[in-house]
C-alpha cells in the first residue's frame, strides 16, 4: 500500500514534473500539470483498521499541495482530488453491506470536478457535496488525545502531543514495535 500511495506518486512526479517545467521554459503554452488521487480516508483523525491507507492518502494530499506551491511559479499545476466512496471493486464490500446510495459519488463527477479544479489552478478538490460537508465537520472535530494501549503495554494517559518518540517526558521507555533507531534495527 505504501508503494502505491507514496512511492509511486513520488516516482511518477519526479519523472513528469521536471519535463513539464522544461517544456514551459522552452515556450510550450498548453496547460501542464498533474492530478493526484488521495482520499477522504486521509482526513479522518483516527482510522482504526485503515491507518496505513489513510496515512498514505494524507501524505498524497499534503505532498501534492506543497508541490503545487513549488511548481506554480513555473506554470505547472498540481491538483489533488479527495474522493469519498466510489462504486468500484474496492468498495464492493461496503456496497454489499448496505452503504446508502448517497454515500457514493459517480466516477464521472470525480473526473469532471478534478479537471475543473486543475484547469482553474486549485491545489485540491473534494467531489460531492456530502464529502465537502464531511470535510468541514472533520476539521471541527477534536483529534483523539490518546488511543487505548494494546494489552500489556503501559497506558500513561498522556496526550499524543506530549509523546516524544519512544520515550515520554517521564523517561519511561515505551514498547513501540514499529520504531527503530536510525535503521540499526535496535530500540533506543
Image (cartoon, grey):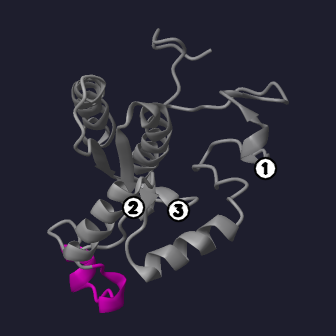
Whether 121 is among the magenta residues is no
Residue 3 or 179: which is nearer the viewer?
3
- The percent position of residue 76, horizontal first and vertical second, equals 35, 38
Whether 96 is among the magenta residues is yes
Element under label 3?
A: loop
**Highlighted range, magenta:** 92-105
According to the image, label 3 marks what residue?
44
Residue 88 or 114: which is nearer the viewer?
114
- The percent position of residue 170, horizontal first and vertical second, equals 85, 30
Q: Taking the image as drawn, is residue 24 in sight?
A: yes
Q: Residue furthest top?
A: 184
According to the image, label 1 marks what residue?
157
Element under label 2?
A: loop
Element under label 1?
A: loop
| Left or right: where 97 falls relative to 147 | left
Q: Closer to the observer: label 1 or label 3? A: 3
Label 3: how many Cα within 10 Å (few below 14, some 14–19, many 20+): many
- The percent position of residue 135, horizontal first and vertical second, equals 54, 69
- The percent position of residue 179, horizontal first and vertical second, equals 53, 26
Q: Which badge, 2 or 1, is on the more N-terminal residue? A: 2
> Which label number is shown at residue 82?
2
Would you place residue 185 above or below residue 155 in this image? Answer: above
Q: Distance between the residues labelled 1 and 3?
A: 22 Å
Q: Which residue lies furthest to the left in this view?
A: 89
Q: Distance between the residues labelled 3 and 2?
A: 12 Å
| Left or right: where 173 falls relative to 51 | right
- Count of labels shown? 3
Q: Which badge, 3 or 2, is on the more N-terminal residue? A: 3
| Left or right: where 92 falls relative to 49 | left
Residue 41 in which image quadrant: bottom left
Would you place residue 93 above or below residue 57 in this image? Answer: below
Residue drawn 28% across the image and 78% down it: 94
Amino acid at each position: 500500500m505504501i508503494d502505491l500511495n507514496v512511492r509511486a506518486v513520488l516516482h511518477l512526479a519526479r519523472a513528469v514534473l521536471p519535463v513539464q517545467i522544461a517544456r514551459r521554459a522552452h515556450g510550450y503554452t498548453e496547460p501542464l500539470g498533474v492530478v493526484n488521487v488521495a482520499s477522504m480516508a486521509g482526513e479522518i483523525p483516527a482510522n482504526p483498521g485503515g491507518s496505513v491507507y489513510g496515512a498514505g492518502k494524507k501524505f498524497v494530499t499534503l505532498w501534492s499541495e506543497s508541490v503545487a506551491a513549488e511548481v506554480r511559479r513555473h506554470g505547472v499545476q498540481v491538483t489533488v482530488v479527495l474522493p469519498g466512496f466510489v462504486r468500484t471493486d474496492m468498495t464492493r464490500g461496503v456496497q454489499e453491506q448496505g452503504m446508502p446510495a448517497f454515500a457514493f459519488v459517480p466516477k464521472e463527477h470525480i473526473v469532471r470536478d478534478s479537471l475543473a479544479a486543475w484547469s482553474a489552478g486549485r491545489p485540491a478538490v473534494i467531489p460531492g457535496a456530502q464529502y465537502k460537508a464531511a470535510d468541514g465537520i472533520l476539521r471541527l472535530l477534536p483529534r483523539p488525545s490518546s488511543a487505548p494501549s494494546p494489552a500489556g503495554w503501559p497506558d500513561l494517559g498522556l496526550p499524543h502531543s506530549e509523546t516524544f518518540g519512544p520515550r515520554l517526558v517521564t523517561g519511561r521507555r515505551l514498547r513501540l514495535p514499529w520504531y527503530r533507531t536510525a535503521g540499526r534495527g535496535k530500540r533506543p
